[in-house]
Amino acid sequence: MEDLIRGRVGGADGYAVRCAIDGDRISGRAGGRLYGKDIELEITERGVQGTVGEESVRIELEEGELRGQVGNQKLVLRGVDRVTGFFGEPIVGWNVVAQQQGEKLQGQLGSTVLGRPFELDLGTAPGWVGTLVAVVAFYALEPRAGATVGR
């Protein structure tokens, strides 16, 4: 039997997330059939790598934190069942906060006013995996998540 991560990013006006976990592989979709992106991730000895849509995901464990890139955005996550971190650039980025309680994960990307809440059923996955899936889904479908500051 495969384990599933499923839920919503962005509340009622957001989008669905559904991923299957098979060993060290996480595969699924953020959004629907027409407006959605595939998620393909693999947990490795050093971190997580894969793709969301056609964008690369590469994150490594460094000094107790997951650090890396989701597409063109920086990501730093710390913690296992209580996860905090930052996604994006300092001026146009999003704080990440999530709390796992049993098989449920609730969190927020960004502020309570302009941010996006997320809620996922994790199955047996740890909170950091669910948080990573939520961030990847947010990047895939939120137009402002891939925006960069002009230089």
Image (cartoon, rainbow, N blue to C red):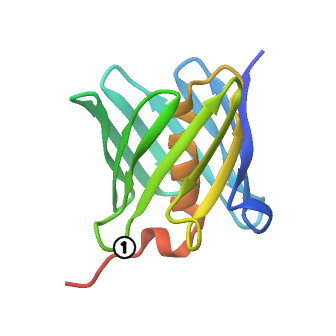
Q: For the image shown, how many numbered marks are present on the structure?
A: 1
Q: What residue appears at the point 72 percent right and 24 percent down from the top-left corner?
A: 123
Q: What residue appears at the point 51 percent right and 66 percent down from the top-left corner?
A: 111
Q: Residue 19: give x, y in percent of width and height.
A: 68, 38
Q: Relative to 144, is 131 above or below?
A: above
Q: Which residue is mark 1?
A: 92
Q: Secondary structure at mark 1?
A: loop
- From the viewer's side, name the closer residue of 64 and 113: 113
Q: Residue 61: give x, y in percent of width and height.
A: 29, 30
Q: Residue 80: give x, y in percent of width and height.
A: 47, 27
Q: Is residue 150 left or right of residue 3?
A: left
Q: Is residue 101 left or right of residue 59?
A: right
Image quadrant holding the C terminus, namely bottom left
Q: What residue appears at the point 70 percent right and 46 percent down from the top-left corner?
A: 119
Q: Quadrant of residue 106?
A: top right
- From the viewer's side, name the closer residue of 139 and 90: 90
Quick one: which residue is furthest to the bottom in this view?
Answer: 150
Q: Is residue 103 left or right of residue 50?
A: right
Quick one: which residue is furthest to the front in this view?
Answer: 112
- From the viewer's side, name the closer residue of 24 and 8: 8
Image quadrant holding the N terminus, namely top right
Q: Residue 75: give x, y in percent of width and height.
A: 35, 50
Amino acid under label 1? Val
Q: Relative to 126, is 133 above or below?
A: below
Q: Is residue 7 left or right of residue 98?
A: right
Question: How many residues crowd mark 1 within 10 Å: few (<14), some (14–19), many (20+)?
Answer: few
